[in-house]
Image: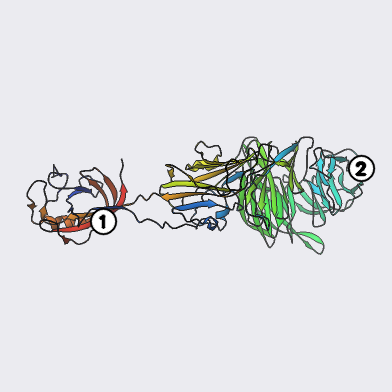
Amino acid sequence: MTLPTTSNVTYPAAEGYHVLLTYGSDAGENLYLQLFLNPEEPMVTRTGEAGQQSPDVAANPEDFRPESGRLFSRSRFDGGEGLDFAHRPEPNKLDGRRYWDSRNLDIRPAEPGDPEELRLLADADRLSTLSVDSEFVRIADSTRVFWADGNDVKWTGDLLAGTPTVTSEDPEGGGGTPGAVVGLGALGRTVYAAVTGEGIHTRTWAGVWSHWSDLAATAMWCVKGRVLGAVSNVLYEAAAAAASTVLKTLESNATWTAVVDAGHVILASASDGVVYAFAEEAGTLVLKEQTDMNPGEVVYSMAHRSGLVFLGTAESTPSGVIGRFYVSQVSGNRLRNAQLVHQWGSGDPAFDHTPKVMTMTRDSVWVAAIEGTAETDLWRYHLSTAGFSRHLVCGAATVPRGITFQEDRAIVGTADDVWRADTLYAAQGWLITPLADFYSAASKSWVGVRVDSDTLTAAGSSVKLYYSTDPAAIQDPAHSSWTLALTLSPAGTTVLATEQALTEVTGRYIALKLELNASTDQTGTPVVRSISARMFENLEDVVLRLPVNVSDVIERPGKIPLRVPGRGDAVAAALRLRDREPALVQFLRSGERYRGQVESVPEARVAMAARGSGRLVSVVQIRGLEVTS
């Protein structure tokens, strides 16, 4: 039996055929089909199975609303920055509280008794009359802050004053040849200063400086009631007069870079890319273990809390220095399971992004580094949530040398000036969410966005929400694809903003950018509690149920039906051979085409027409997508 194909049928519509089924890559592998169409046997075209349309709370239970569609929302942000995709195959439990990036927004866990909310951070105030050459040092039972500046040790009781009263002291007590202060630390109320060429000097509570150790240290640290000093490649435990003890000698071209009290051990890092662990035995420090860092990386700053060690590292490249921040565990006497939290720079010419200073507070680890090519930023690692966020934005790209706090206000010192958290809010801040796609590559219709905010009353303050369906937008807050969706301002703003409808916004992803603007005088900040976007998935699967005539009778328009013995069996057999095979379906009259797969070719059954005799029909099911080009 010869099957009807494009090679032997010239006028298929005139001969009663409705569909051309192409089931191979070769156009010759095709088959004309006649459908048996009547009210009892309609051709069914429908979309694939739709998902549930009940309220979806999987992303954020706090945003439960009786709405259809699916909701992407954020009502907590203390999980930290760096999340690029909101819906990952193996999500972390904190992903629902994370975002991609932020600037000038207070990202922190709420204090006990306070609500979760998002507000602006303080602006950065520049104090250009001071310069800092070392870490800031505080002594017990005092508000005084000490730091090194050239050949002097300086201190003040109020770094937050408009013009702080600064006392400058010569650590050599006026004797000897002035030398640069290359190390500063404190044990209790005693301040220690390593002076180039003059050894280590101490300052009593009464303010009297005197020579203490002959060790000509080029760097110095105070830990566990001990003073450690480095002389080039040799690390010593410093002692009075000439009694210092050698702890470890490196290769001749290596130097010591940082020391930290890590609980049961003292960790010391060196430019050879190794972190050495010293522990006390019979009152003496003994080298117990060493941990190699990644090839090419050197640790320059460290902090410790509750078994975790925080590392600031540098990797030199031909065009600049890349800085990184790690969190590691102390297991025995070694560092293990180091996790990269953040990276600064990618080899920017002439810029050193090394996070060279780090400090601890009650609930956070603080680290500062040059960001990009135009500024130095102070970053905060929240111990309770492991969230990492940008805190204070300083407006000059200078290497930070000290971090301290006064009245919970951050202070960053550099070689050029001191930056302080101001009493005024930053003029503007923003937060960019990760890309949301609900684990589906299908195109979606994004139909609305919402911001829940406190009522705005301060003149000039506003909240703006932007959206983008371009994945590249999250890397650039000024990306051209960001589109303003809504603005909240003092005029007519309510506590719970109604959803703002989006028109013809489709795409696999959506990202939101929340922008907060302070009042005109920068004394007031908007307060935001949540943001969200709602979508409906565009289900592209199409299921075709084609009632194919597999009888020996062919219906012809305007003509008597033609009986061809064996014709029905041949067509049915050809269809069964293509079950589960790829196929292209083309409707001859409308020209519509669908590419997909033959899902089922059931056994033929008798279908009765309203008038005339019955026919054998096989309802072939094909699933695929409409071909539009």
Res. 448 in view: yes
* Relative horizontal placement of residue 568, taking residue 257 as reference (left or right): left
| Rendered image: mark on residue 136 | none
Q: Position of residue 219 (x, y in %)?
A: 79, 46
Res. 509 in view: no
Distance, label 1 to label 2, CA atoms, is 95 Å
Q: Position of residue 143 (x, y in %)?
A: 83, 49
* N-terminal label among 1 and 2: 2
Of residue 307 and residue 242, the one placed in the foreground of this image is: 307
In the picture as drawn, the residue positioned furthest to the bottom comes out as 282
Nearer mark to the viewer, of 1 and 2: 1
Of residue 467 and residue 530, the one placed in the foreground of this image is: 530
In the picture as drawn, the residue positioned furthest to the front comes out as 492
Q: Which residue is mark 2?
A: 173
Image quadrant containing the C terminus: top left
Q: Amino acid at mark 1?
A: Gln
Q: Is 600 situated above or below 628?
A: below
* Relative horizontal placement of residue 445, taking residue 562 as reference (left or right): right
Q: Is 563 situated above or below 321?
A: below
Of residue 378 and residue 327, the one placed in the foreground of this image is: 378
Quarter of the view holding residue 328: bottom right
Q: How is the image coloured?
A: rainbow
Q: Residue at x 74, y 60 (%)?
A: 263
Q: Which residue is mark 1?
A: 621
Quarter of the view holding residue 12: top left
Q: Position of residue 606 (x, y in %)?
A: 15, 61
Q: Residues within 10 Å of mark 2 (few under 14, many from 20)?
A: some
Q: Disc 1 on helix, strand or loop?
A: strand
Q: Amino acid at mark 2?
A: Gly
Of residue 208 and residue 491, the one placed in the foreground of this image is: 491
Q: Disc 2 on helix, strand or loop?
A: loop
Q: Residue at x 14, y 49 (%)?
A: 4
